[in-house]
Structure formats: structure tokens, C-alpha cells
Amino acid sequence: MPDQHHPRGLHCRRQRCIWTLMVALGLVCGSQLILPLLRRGGALGGTGSAWVAHERSGTTSTMPSPRPEPGLPSGASLPRVAPSAQSALPLSAVTPFKLGEEAELPSPVSEVTRLHLVVSSDCSAYQRWQVLVQVQSARSVGQRGAYTWILSGCSEDDQRDVRALVEASFGGRLLAVHFTPDYSNMSTYGGPYADGKLKRYFNGRRSPYGNKYKFNNKPNAFAHWLQASETLQAHETAVLIDPDFLFLRPLEISPDKGQPGRPSAQFYGLGDQWVREFDRGAICGNHSLCTATTSKEVYDSFSVGPPYLVHHADAARLAATWAEFVPRVYDQYPQLYAEMFAYAMAAAHLDLKHSYLREMIGCMVSWPTKRFGERWVLESANISRKALRQHRQEIPEAPRSPALCFPRSGLATSPPVFLHYCQHFTDGNMSFFKRNVAPGSVLDCATGPFQPHSGGAPGSRRRHQSTRNLEPQWASIAMCSIVSAISGLRAEMCGGVG
């Protein structure tokens, strides 16, 4: 006879109740342990994290006609793509799964899993290794959410090579791939510079790119991806990042970030140059909000760069306007940051004020010793230098995750989320510069373990963002993070050889 007076209304005897609870608890715990093992490609290092792999159909040769988006500016539309440009090659055969299939997730976790990470690159081996290392770094720190790699300008052979690399690195589970045409030829947009006879200058400085501006791929490729049949979901926020970003810890955002009408982005020191020096009417239109934007408003809301966090509700119209503005900005400012200024101007035009993230170290932002504290920086540098020595000596215990370059106990400070490593790092007889990395030293398993450069800074004609004045501690931290992430990728690709 059940005990009617059992606490909480459980109708069972005490022993049967305890047994029932133990079985239930075992089922819950077992599911948490077994499911990740069954879904081997989708479980990440970290605390029970998993990624969503969105499989694109890839079997049709035409793109759907762009649908008009509410709120698009006059004359703006999503870029149309020639049918022949759409890849007909299928993605690796995988079985997509959703995080929600494993358990009913509490609402705080949904704030993490609503992120959809997007990285845009060209098809060069130089950017391929950077993206694969980035994805491995995200995996190693336990980042959650879907992840898509958009590549522009790949031949059919390139596409097969990229898919093979993704399969070798992650088993085809962790990373969706989307291919787009190449948008770097600025002569296709017409204007006075289209024929190449009139050279592009800004303030007496000749453009280093001429009519070949590869950074125009990012806004157009992002817009192209947003037209795909299975792309950004209605509840998701896109996190658009560059190839030379590394994850140092997972990106977790508060509920007020990346919401409809409230995008977020990293604060950059770009400032208000486009307010002071550009003909905004020629770029945005004479009646645009962009033309009325003040310097104060720029510093409050629009001095931004990647990562860009844009909700599904705003993504299509912002991407279309961004892509529309880049050629106009480039005609006036044919320099490196044209597409970044175009993004800021598009956001101002659409009245999409950004809240700032301050989750990155590296070039174009800062190395904030004061924020993290000298003790934390020094301890992180000591850990990093020890790890770099292990890599140099090819010790098997050398770290294979950027997270291991920082204190794991004792100090309360966590590292920032991202390292942007476009700079040249040097500490003592070790140095690293991404342009000096032979892609084969990362992607070819026949080469030995990856090593930072020895003997000081290697020669390079293109020392972008020199770190001559950077504290050696930060240089060691950066190099440890990069080398550990590369070693982690090589361990995945090459059967444990970092």
C-alpha cells in the first residue's frame, strides 16, 4: 500500500522512492555522458558542449530569388548571384543534430546556443589554415553554437580540397561550408576608376589595392550566405569574425547583446574619419541618417569592427546596405578599412546603434595590462613561455589549446574571448608573424611539429601592425595561444602529431 503521507506527495514506500530516484538520476546522468560519446564529431572539449552542424543542400544549381526585406533602404537589394556561381558539389554526408535534442535546455543556456559563428575568407591556403586553426581553438575552449565558413572565389577543385580539409580536421561535423563568387574586382561596379586608367588616391596616398579589393568579399559573401535555403535561423544571432581570430575562452553574451534592432560589436579605434572627411551624401544619400550622424554618435555607437553580432531580424538589410556602400566608400577612400567604414555608415543609415563588446586583445584594439592587472599578465606570460619551450623541445605535454596559456586557478581574472593576431610578435629569440607561416607547416602532416620562428624576428617586407613597443609578456601570451591552437589542429588532422 503506498504511503499517502510521503513528503512531496510521492506515493511510494521510502525504499522504493529512493530506488526510483536513483534510477531517474542515473538515466539523466547517463544521457549526459553517453550521448556526447555517441555523437563523437559534435562533442567539444569543455563541459558538455556541442555544436550544431547545418548541412546545406548543395544539390541545386540556382539560388532563390532575393525576397524583399522590410526596412531596406531605397535602392538597396540583396546581391544577385549568377546561377552558375552556386556550387553544385554536395557537402560531406553528415547527420545534423540540434542541441535541443539532447535535453530541455534552461533559458540561460539558450543565450549561448543562439549564436551562429560565421567566418569569411578567400580561398587561399594562407586563409585556409587560419580558419581551421580558429575553429580548432573554438572547439578546444568549448565554444557552443553553429559554425559556418564562407569562402569566396574557390574553383571546383578548391572546393573539394576545402571539404577534404574540413573532413580531415573535424570529421565533417563541426563546420558547415558555403561557397560564393569572388567580389574583389571593383571595376565591375563602374565609376571613374573602372577602366584602371585613373589611379585611386586618398589624401595623396595611392591605393595599394587598385581595382582588386579582396575585403569587398566579406559583406557580399555574408549577404550571399543569408540567401541560402538553410542559413541563419530566426532565433539566431550571427557572430561575424575574421580568419585571424583565435578563441581564448568561450563567447557568452548577455541577453541584451545582439538582439533585434540592437546589434553589438567590438569597439575599435576607427573613430569618426568618415564623418569628417567623406562625402556622406554620395555614399548614403542626402536624406540618410548617416549624413546627420555626429562625431559623438560615432564614438557612442559606430566605432566598431568584428566580431559583429547581428540578429536574424537585422542581418539581411544590414548586409545588403553594407555591400551597397563599400564600392562608394572605396571610390573615396581606397584603403584597407574601406569596408569597415562602410559597415559603420550602413549601421548609421539604418539607425542600428551598436552596443560595444570589449572582449578582444590584439591589433586594432589594445593590450590592456591595467584592465587585467600586472600580476595576471606576468603569470600568464610565465605559463606561456614555459609552453613555448615545450613546443620548441617537442615535448608531448605541450599545450594544444590557447586556454592553457593562462592561469587556471589562483587568479580570478579570465582571459578575453578573442585574440586578433595580425601583428608581428617577438619575445627574446622567438617570434611569430602570420605572413611568414608556410601553409604546409600547418596543413601538411608530413612536416614536423609546428614551431615558432627562432633567432628573433624573421625578415618580412610586410610587417603589418608591428609590435615593436608591445610588452614582451603580451607577445609571449599571443605566441603561446597561436602555436598551441596550431598544434591542436595538427593533432586532430595528423593523429596526435602537433
Image (tube, rainbow, N blue to C red):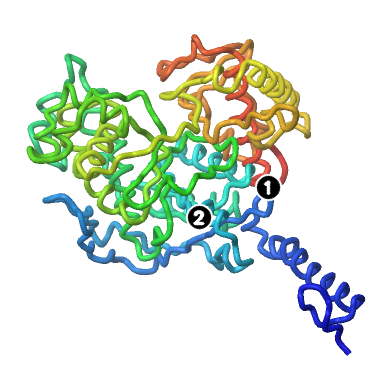
| Amino acid type, label 1 | Gly
Q: Which mark is residue 487?
A: none
The quarter of the rendered structure image containing the N terminus is: bottom right
Question: Residue 226 is drawn in which quadrant?
Answer: bottom left
208 sits to left or right of 439: left
Furthest toward the front, the residue is 5
List the residue tagged with mark 2. Answer: 146
- Identified at 41% across, 62% down, the residue is 89
In-front residue for pair 281/356 = 356
Quadrant (top left, top right, bottom left, bottom right) of the C terminus: top right
Q: Secondary structure at mark 2?
A: strand
In this figure, which residue is indicated by the disc labeled 1?
46
Rate crowding at label 1 as few (under 14), some (14 to 19) or many (20 or more) other CA atoms within 10 Å.
Answer: some
The residue at 23%/41% (across/down) is: 346
Badge 2 amino acid:
Ala
Q: Position of residue 147 (x, y in %)?
A: 49, 52
Q: Is residue 190 left or right of residue 412?
A: left
Q: Is residue 86 left or right of residue 82?
A: right
Q: Nearer the viewer, residue 294 or 195?
A: 294
Mark 2 to mark 1 CA distance (whole Å): 16 Å
Q: Residue at x 63, y 10 (%)?
A: 428
The residue depicted at 39 percent of the width and 62 percent of the height is 234
